[in-house]
Amino acid sequence: MDKPLRDDFRPSRNEACFCNSGLRFKNCCGSSASNRQPPYGVVVIENFLSPDECQALVVLAKTLESERLTIVDLEHTNEDEVVRKVDEGRVTERVDMSAHQSRLDQFVKQALLEVVEPHVKDKVSWFEQPQLLKYNPGGFYLPHADSENFDESSQRWRKDLDRDISLLLYLNSDFEGGHISFENFGYKIKPKAGMLIFFPSDSRYLHTAEAVTEGVRYAIVSWSSLLSSPKVRRSPPPDAISLI
């Protein structure tokens, strides 16, 4: 199957902003103003989850086992199978929520149906089974795009996964560091308990989970595929949850 290629997203600060606002990039999505709004495509909803919902999940997570997370192994991944590996650029853990997975599924499904679909004006075809991530002190994830990887031969970004929307639900605020930063926009967000963040999964929205310096950061993460989006894989991931 064809895998679309995308040019590197490096707008000049004096170019017209890609969001079609009519402003220069430096005065719009690339602004350095302290009171700026999130760049186009990045949506931040505070208090999507209630304090009680967040606290209950954090208390539960502290009682459960967790294991080191992996990334996609591009060398061995093909159209029919996604192979994963441990990578030093991602130091975080996945909490074993197998006995409580339905709670995560319901929160993400609610966010997709109530917030994401109306915002993007499209239907979500499926979403990957949500994960509850645990970032201990020193935990981080280096700059990455969730659906695309840089192809050295063409010097362009190649879409390898059918992820269109990346979604995060943050469960606590009692930690230091741990910002999510968007490299191409010079923009970062300090997560708060109950906060929902979603954005396109492509390389324009290259992002970093900055290192936690104190405390532990907990977050739910999932990725979804839009109904109208062309697909690059033969089928959804084995753990995908259908919404159509």
Image (tube, helix red, strand yellow):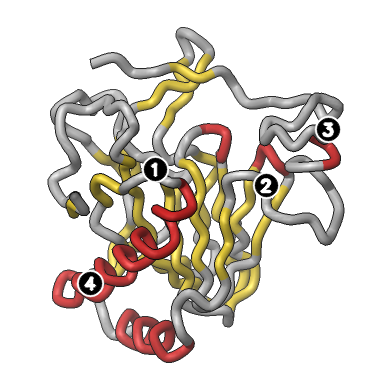
Q: Residue at x 67, y 35 (%)?
A: 19
How far apart in space, not on screen, are marks 2 and 3 (Cα)?
A: 13 Å
Q: Earlier in the sequence, mark 4 or mark 2?
A: 2
* Pointer 4 with pointer 1, Cβ within 8 A: no
- In this view, 182 is above or below 131: above
- Residue 24 bears which disc, if any? 3
Report which residue position mark 2 lands on. Answer: 39
- Classify mark 4: residues with Cα within 10 Å, few (<14), some (14-19) or many (20+): some
Q: Quadrant of residue 100?
A: bottom left
Q: Residue at x 48, y 88 (%)?
A: 51
- Residue 97 bears which disc, if any? 4
Q: Residue at x 62, y 68 (%)?
A: 213
- Residue 87 bears which disc, if any? 1
Q: Earlier in the sequence, mark 2 or mark 1?
A: 2
Q: Quadrant of residue 188?
A: bottom right
- Classify mark 2: residues with Cα within 10 Å, few (<14), some (14-19) or many (20+): some
How far apart in space, not on screen, are marks 4 and 2 (Cα)?
A: 33 Å
